[in-house]
Image (cartoon, coloured by chain):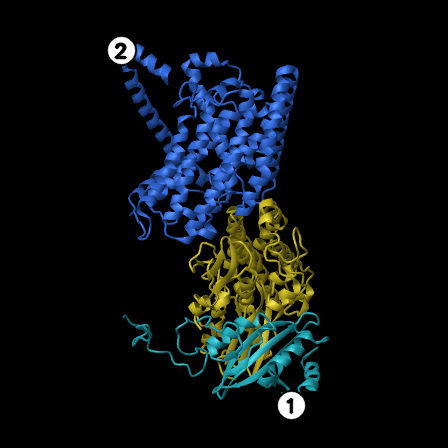
Amino acid sequence: MLELSDKILESFGLSSQYSLVVIIILFFVYGLFALTFGSLFAGITSWYERRIAGRMQSRIGPNRVGYQGFWQWLADGLKCWFKEDIIPKDTDSVLFRIAPYLVFTGVLCTFVVIPFAPSVVGSDMNVGLVYIIAITALVVAGILMAGWASDSKWTLFGGIRSTAQMISYEIPVALSLIVVVIPAGTLSLQKIIISQGGAPYNWYIFHNPAAFVAFFIYFTSALAEGNRTPFDLPEAESELVAGYNTEYSGMRFLFFLFAEWMNLYVIGGIATAVFLGGWRIPGIAYEVQMESIWLQFAGFIVYLIKALILVNVIIWLRWTLPRLRIDQLMIMCYKYLVPISILLIIVSIIFTILYESVPVVGLVVRLLLFLLGVVIMIYFSYRVYYNIRNFPDKTYLKWMI
Amino acid sequence: MNISEVHTELGKFFQGKVSEVITSGKISYFYFDREIIYDLFLVLRDKIGMEFKHLSYIASVDMKEHLELIYCLYSYRWGSVIHLKTRIDRGNPHIRTISDLYVSAEWHEREAYDLMGIVFDEHPDLRRIMMPDDFEGHPLRKDFVEKDNYHGIPTKRDKILGRF
Amino acid sequence: MTLEERLNAVKKENEILLNMGPQHPSTHGVIRFIVRADGEIMVEALPVVGYLHRGIEKLAEMTPYPGFIPYTDRVDYLAAMFCNHAFVMGVERLLGVEVPKRAEYLRMIASELNRIASHLISLGSMAMDIGAFTPFLHGIRERELINDITEMLCGSRLTYNYMRIGGVSNDINDNILKKINDFLDRFLPGFIEEFNRLITYNEILVKRCINIATISSEEAINFGLVGPNLRASGVKWDLRKNMPYSIYPEFKFDIPVGEGFKGSVGDSYDRFVVRVKEMEESAKIIRQAISNIPDGEIMAKVPKRVKPPVGEVYSAVESARGELGYHIISDGSENPYRCKIRTGSFSAMKAIHIKSQGCFIADLVVLIASMDIVAPEIDR
């Protein structure tokens, strides 16, 4: 951001005493951009999720409002905006009202460190990862407020379950991200992306076996943080109606949902940045990419595609798997994920030292892990082919097999 | 065991308290006096050779002069089903419960109490089950007349097929 | 006693009182549970029923015998063929009417199709309560085909009113037979395999369901459980084999019994798997039946005004939820004197009340879903 502001001042020919003003204006612009991007993403993800859910369940999703139902989310948003804002009588007036905003802000503030393109990032803090983990604590506070302030025992249940779940799963998230920080040597997201290579075998997911496992642990723990199935017991429909957001209606309710869908992009974005090479394009060096505007735009698209693939996987998991019970959730976190993550950090340290002393081992292990990844993808495609072949229901992809 | 064998077995224990085996339509049953109900069912449930461990239902019937209770027992071990009946007079509709022998009897007896008005002594939780708690009357009786209103809402209309 | 007195009698300090009200996203109908919980662990889940009481037994005393058949549909609308069949069988036994063979075959085919449809809904609801939304809709997709078949057969998709005293109302033709064949080709083994891969072998479902509310065989018999609940606890009792009625003795099929497939015998997972296996067996029965339906009449000669002689009868069929029985007392007139309906879900409620002690609240939902209760059966 500072370089950008200097460039702008130079091109306008103004002296550097206005740099503060320019920086503040740039921050506003970026904030607006992040807000727009987040809200648009949340809206479009809602349409996409409903279509995917419909197709997985042998039905069509929304397809009336606009071409293939694309403007459904706008229609829903407008409807919710005009709804009556019902606030039950015995709720705690301040907490009930500000809880959605806290949840929304907590998720939105993580957009500050997520890099969109090589030079488009809100603020490339050198403690980026720690900032993300810290700011999502606002979400916990918001949910607890929502559960308590709605004057109902069921929402209290949902709020407390959610709080326990979210603060527990922050530990594996942090630990599995540290597994990658050790070879990278920095906590800032842009520098982690820069220190990876472009080609897939240079990504951190294939860097050492510990990072490979850490990717899956991060993915699972981030799902639990975001209250998505299979960890959505706090908002379990069949027991608690809607958990902590039962008593909310209209736009306040939509804020919770917005935060949930924006969180999908945050999960995907951080996983891409840390494990999957971010905006690096295979075969192009970082300096070359920084020079050319088109390559930066291409980097933006590459980042978006990688994050969207992960978002796709999250949506897919939601509509397939049942949900875990609260004690099974906590057991999984404390008895399995946390010890494994700690072990992975130690393994990662060992491997990093090994790579520095004997570089050949690094190349060999990386190629082996990359081959393992390729084998897994091939097996997965084979299972998909087998399932489509043997479905009893008419699948529209049969013509291509 | 079928019903006649059960009857002969039970005749040894409960002389004079059980009636003859009556066949009416397609089922056979016998009556027993209501005082011996607990011991009778204890024998039926536990005696080797009978082992009627499954209580299927308890039906309450309103024969105009008296009330009747029909018990239906299954024996899965020997693959047989028997029916038993007992008479209860309308003025004093009390009988001992068997819900400590058969757990399923608890809800069947509650239904009999609710819909027919038979009171089961020593029942752990005798409440109305299907009608609201403050309902008056026992609907399944033949002489049941509905009240005019329920909490102020009229229950009868003058013209059934007309408008309000 | 009233409900408040019952609750106040056992009140303790550190327990909270939660209300799983009559309106419930868990789709089992209008039942209310008052849960006394100590944190997440339940002390008691008291069922309160009666929200769906329509007085069918009292209505039976004012309705002529043939006119009561649509009422019997509504006793259990998900398995309506069985309710029809049991009532009609009872009246036929009283009258001494012999039902023609073709009608028996048609009755059995329709009943077994209905069993498959009912189990699809029950398994799908159980999966949906645990959080997997997709198997329910896959089950609905298959059930739509069954609904289309019954629509062609008798004109209605849910409450069939298909059986009459002495036979059935409509005949079957080659079109419908072809549709049933297509359905079976698609259902067994394609759909069952896919369903099993999707949800039955799913690790999360297994972990949620094993060792929840284990009911041993002695307990199950004492609680009065019937049907798949009883068979999952290890008791091999099925009315179609042990007390045969209709033409079931001529067909070869197995009775699936719970063996503790992944947990202990008689837990919720056993009840799930037993229902899946029962669907397979029903499909096998229909396959055997379709190929040799005899020719003949579909309805016996029964007088217009049905007046059975004085007597009583108890007729029971093995419905999707267990033993559905009608105890009909006739006094020689056109209406029954007393018609008592014995349903499987009524006894299952008491079993839920007892088995819910010590479970988590999340397990209560699994327990209720695995017992496969429908509210109209309880309240009639």
Q: Quadrant of residue A23?
A: top left
Q: Quadrant of the N terminus of chain C?
A: bottom left
Residue C352 relative to residue C216: left or right? left
Indicate the secondary structure of the residue bearing disc 2: loop
Amino acid type at mark 2: Leu
Specify the farthest residue to the front: C13
Who's yellow, chain-wise? C
Specify the farthest residue to the bottom: B16
Specify the farthest residue to the right: B49
**Residue named by callout 1:** B16
Q: Nearer the viewer, mark 2 or mark 1?
A: 2
C189 over A24 or under it: above or below: below
Q: Is residue A159 visible?
A: yes
Q: Nearer the viewer, residue A350 or B149?
A: A350
Who's blue, chain-wise? A
**Residue named by callout 2:** A14
